[in-house]
Amino acid sequence: MTDGRGAPLKGAALAVTALALALGTFMQVLDLTIANVSLPTIAGNLGVSTDSGTWIITSFAVANGISVPLTGWLMGRYGVVRVFTLSVIAFTIASFLCGIAWNLPVLIVFRVIQGAVSGPMIPGSQALLIAIFPAEKRGTGLGIWSITTLVAPIAGPVLGGYISDNFHWSWIFLINIPVGSFVAFIVWRMLRVHETPTRKLPIDRVGLGLLIIWVGALQVMLDLGKNADWFHDPFIVVLAIITAVGLLAWLIWELTDAHPIVDLSLLSNRNFLFGSLALCLGFAIYFANVVLLPLWLQTQLGYTATWAGLAVAPSGVVAVVLTPLIARLMRVVDVRWIATMSFAALVGSYMMRASYTTDVSFATIALGSAVQGIGASGFFLSLLTILLDRVPPNQTPSATGLSNFVRIVVGSFATSITTTMWDRREALHQSHLVESTTPASASYIDVLHRLGGLGIHGPGADAAIQHQLVGQAYLLSTVELYWAFALMTGFMILFVWLTKRAKGGQAAAAAE
């Protein structure tokens, strides 16, 4: 990388800088998943319910999604190196604040800050990794970036689980401090003389303000609604009105403004529209599944956070192994077939999980995760290739910004909706099970006799039966959600075949 003010990087300097940039991506992606398996531990330590604890995930994701559209303006106005370095420093400080949070509201505020300042980290690391390598080795830079985005989701649940089981949960955030300090120091020291050109650019302040209003109102409505009886609560109704009016105003403004923060004109591109729909909705289901499975394993099956992380880890391992092979295959096969096979594998993994029982083995769960990894290996590559295929080069930054914004925000919404439905369906199934398990029923009496044979009598027996009813109710709710995941994911294949055949070049090369 050179602009005339400094010699190109090579040798050890190139290797260390590439490592620092890769760690920048790793940290940001890691923080999307590391808290998933730690939710029960954090919620218990802070004295709140697990469903309230999902705010720890959604607050970060929504704030990050809102900040992503700003990335292009910030880098054009202040330079890629400066913006990336300051983003890493701010992210590191926010991680420290998360680690010292003393209650849930404070932790959520710090997570919002952490998500907001991390918007430039992934696109910044990607741009700089491409730039520091010579043109003939640019694929190497893209490959490093791509692999780190796949490794981080593997490490997140495992690392989060190990820390939660063996140390205080705050260390899932505090570990970012030495890593972030190293990344910021190396990148600024090595690349500050290679800063990209800057220029004064207009910023769509109205569009940004409206975006924050309607996305924020919608997320708060989804997170509070499950405990407020939804639209029977006036506050939820007010939030719904703010969301609807804010969204409509934002759409009108963005479609008419000369310099919109989100270029909605891209939606007129058929491949971008249907490719983005398939990517964002498919990712939303995938992300909801990533949250739901560890939650069920820990709260209902007695898994520790570490074992819950290990149970989902095969998904990432398989994805890392298969992604380079998928990238080569995309050069000779219609990318739509790769996307179709990826969705089919994801459907298969969700159907496997829909057959689980309360005594499901660890090996069976890990196998389902491995099948999910087969789907994930081709999912992102194929759909990114499809949605960017017919986008003009000058609109590519806007296209990636828009698709990333929708993907992150929709994934956060899916988490809230899924945990709400999980609890509501459990309550419904539990009421049905209680009705059919009265003290006078033959099944109830039979269970009491069996418990009596184990030395469990009176209130202890009643409590044991109630525990089993709750466990079965959550199982039925989990099974229903996975059947829904399978059906909705299968439907995404229709969007794939509404696109035109794409050329498999750029995204495929990026993974090799």
Image (cartoon, rainbow, N blue to C red):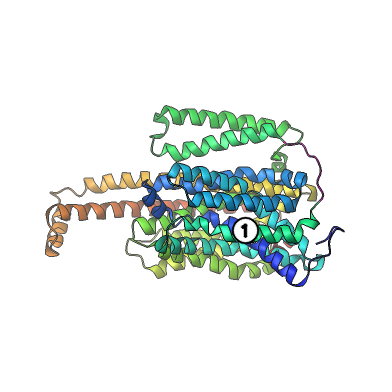
Quarter of the rendering occupied by the C terminus? bottom right
59, 94: nearer the viewer: 94
Q: Mark 1 points at which residue?
A: 181
Query: In the rendered image, which quarter is residue 62 located in?
Result: top right
The residue at the far right in this view is 4
The picture places residue 181, in percent across and down from the top left corner, at 62, 58
The picture places residue 363, in percent across and down from the top left corner, at 41, 70
**Vertical order, 74 against 236 (above or below):** below
Asked if residue 457 lies left or right of residue 337, the reply is left
The picture places residue 175, in percent across and down from the top left corner, at 53, 60
The amino acid at mark 1 is Ser
Asked if residue 69 lies left or right of residue 195, the reply is left
21, 280: nearer the viewer: 21
Which secondary structure type mostly characterizes the magenta part of the structure? Answer: loop
At horizontal 41% and vertical 65% (from top left) the residue drawn is: 307
In this picture, which residue range is highlighted in magenta? 197-203
At horizontal 67% and vertical 66% (from top left) the residue drawn is: 19
Magenta residue check for 344: no
Magenta residue check for 199: yes
Within 10 Å of disc 1 (Cα), the crowding (few <14, some 14-19, many 20+) is: some
290, 15: nearer the viewer: 15
Asked if residue 308 lies left or right of residue 446, the reply is right
- Residue 321 appearing in the image: yes
- Residue 330 appearing in the image: no
Quarter of the rendering occupied by the N terminus? bottom right
Name the secondary structure under disc 1: helix
Query: In the rendered image, which quarter is residue 335 located in?
Result: bottom right
Number of numbered discs: 1
**Vertical order, 28 against 333 (above or below):** above
503, 473: nearer the viewer: 473
**Vertical order, 8 against 436 (above or below):** below
The picture places residue 346, in percent across and down from the top left corner, at 52, 60
